[in-house]
Amino acid sequence: MAHNQRTRLTSRLKIFLWAIALVLAITAVIPGPVIARDQAPSAEEKQACIEDVFRLCSSHIPDPTAITACLRSKQESLSQQCRYVISVRDTGHKSSNSK
């Protein structure tokens, strides 16, 4: 490989690595919003909704996305605890008087 080609390749590699480092630095400093509805349910959330899942949405087991969509579509039939969990996950805000 000629010296010029090697120099150009090295320069391009340095630019590429610099660009990757820049992207990583930016994403580390400015993370995207963490939306509650996108997070895996906690053990407490699962416990609050497990009876409703079996009663209303058992045909969607084991798909968690389909189960959550099913629970959302049947809000009126949910237990108070599960309705609270779904509303908190949808809004991302806990209310001290909602439970």
Image: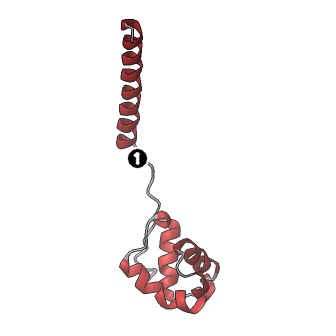
In-front residue for pair 37/8: 8
Instruction: Say above or below: 11 vs 33.
Output: above
* Residue 64 image point, x, y percent: 52, 74
Quadrant in which the C terminus appears: bottom left
Circle 1 residues within 10 Å: few <14, some 14–19, many ≥20: few
Callout 1: SS: loop
Q: Residue at x 62, y 86 (%)?
A: 76
Instruction: Say above or below: 98 vs 18.
Output: below
* Residue 25 image point, x, y percent: 35, 36
Q: Residue at x 47, y 78 (%)?
A: 85
Quadrant in which the N terminus appears: top left
Name the colour scheme.
Answer: secondary structure
> How many numbered discs, if any?
1
Question: Most extreme residue toward the front, as rendered?
Answer: 1
* Residue 15 image point, x, y percent: 40, 22
* Residue 43 image point, x, y percent: 36, 79
Residue with the mark numbered 1: 31
Instruction: Say above or below: 22 vs 31.
Output: above
In-front residue for pair 33/40: 40
In-front residue for pair 85/17: 17
Q: Amino acid at mark 1?
A: Pro
